[in-house]
Image (cartoon, grey):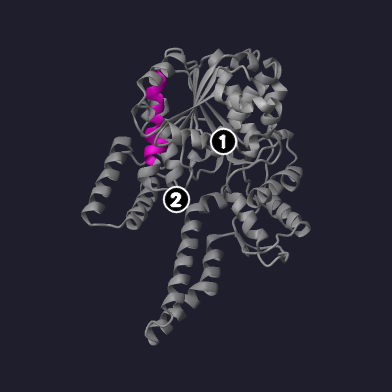
Amino acid sequence: MELGSALQFLDNKSILVTGGTGFLAKIYVEKILRVQPNVKKLYLLVRAADHKSAIHRLHHEIVEKDLFRNLKEKCGINFSSFISQKITVIPGDLTHQDLGLHDSDLLQLLCKELDVLLNLAATTNFDERYDVALDLNTLGAKYVVDFAKKCAKLQVLVHVSTAYVSGERSGLIVENSYRMGETLNGVTGLDVNIEKQVVEDQLHLLRLQGASDKDVTIAMKDLGIQRARLYGWPNTYVFTKAMGEMMVGELKDIIPAVIIRPTIITSTYKEPFPGWVEGIRTIDSLAVGYAKGKLTFFLGDLEAIVDVIPADMVVNAIIVAMIAEARHQQPQTIYQVGSSIRNPLRYSNLQDYGFRYFTKNPWINKDGKPVIVSKVTVMNSMDSFQRYMAFRYLLLLKGLELANAAFCHFFQGVYSNLNRKINWVMRLVDIYRPYLFFNATFDDLNTEKLRMTARTSLVENDMFYFDPKSIDWEDYFMNIHIPGIVEYIFK
């Protein structure tokens, strides 16, 4: 398989990107515009009430970001006109037919002109409302495929999922697809239409009961967890993303399609510059909590592999996979993009990097004083965690409950506050537990084949790097990623 020139492929192409204001989408857009300014058009689908609101989001949430500083320097005074010429922002909604587009002329133009459709829209909240996650992650994938079928000259559909659709399985996770209705625990009966009906019935019941917005949100979150675990997935996010993959596989027909499954995505490794990040993700929130002195213990297996991959490598993998599929159409290919096979990183490494970095560069608290960090207590099982919570907090909570009853609810505020915090921690642990004790690695045979093909036949192979073997994790975390997170927080 010959890939030829990526820049030649991108020349004069029209590309639609859903989830246009998302983290990966911004990096993708910046990369395309920087390396191939002769791309014909990038259409960015964003949630917005109208075109004016969409334009506002384009400027304030995308092109004004520091991410675009190299492109701004390259374009100089022509930056604004270049963006106006190359980017068309579209107000739409992935949860509706035709992606929620109301402009019939624009709809017709897209169906006639599009060469590539990249679906990046998703809610990545593990504890999302089920109705929201089902709409966006599952039904959104269906509407994207339906739209792709209407595009007369579409060369490839790229659907970005997550490697964690594998659930809690251990061992080697291969790049296999999910059949419609397939479940992780063998329970039969999974049907997207039934899931839609379950959601509608629950919402109808809640309305009849006069439930508050807060109660509806809680009920929808609980429903998502219940439905996910019924079929073997640990949370709503990965369950709805797995069903989204099923939708793509079942409905695509002859549309050339690839599925990209990244692992945990971190800050940029090289481009457009090292350390750019937006938002605090799971492992980053642990680092920040530790730096502030608020994380006093770690629950998990320190020797477990934590599979991370820099965002620019994910974007490069997307672009190369896109080109490979467009030029050599094959049955649907799945690419798992991660590091656990080629260059494994362990939680013990992260603990060491965090301790060394924040010892040398302490967090300054609101009083202007440096926070002194120390090695945290490690709990390597749920039993040890539950014992810790019982002795440290639950006994205190029980004492407050008794005192509150004895003193006519004098301690009600303190009791309610502590109870709420404990329930919040326990829910978080319940949701994230599978990843703290994750005992699997992600096979990337298809991705490695793609890398080998790029090495031998992609003219600009160095420009579209995505080999995790090239990463020195100590250098990356100590000099790129952690400083990038700190800079993002203090902006």
Q: Nearer the viewer, residue 397 or 177?
A: 397
Question: Which structural element holds mark 1?
Answer: helix
Which amino acid, by three-letter code, is at mark 2? Asp
Q: Quadrant of residue 442?
A: top right
Residue 304 in the magenta stretch? The answer is: no
For this rendering, which residue is in front, 428 or 177?
428
**Left or right for 253, reference 37:** left
Amino acid type of the residue that numbered disc 1 sits on in the rendered structure: Ile
Disc 2 designates what residue?
127
The reply, left or right, for residue 134 in relation to residue 20 is left
Between 174 and 248, the one lying in front of the other is: 248
Q: What is the magenta range?
A: 134-149
Rendering coords of residue 52 (x, y %): 45, 33
Q: Are marks 1 and 2 in contact (CB under 8 Å)?
A: no
User: Residue visible at 22% across and 57% down?
Assistant: 209
Q: Which residue is mark 1?
A: 62
Residue 182 visible within the image? no
The quarter in which the N terminus is drawn is top right
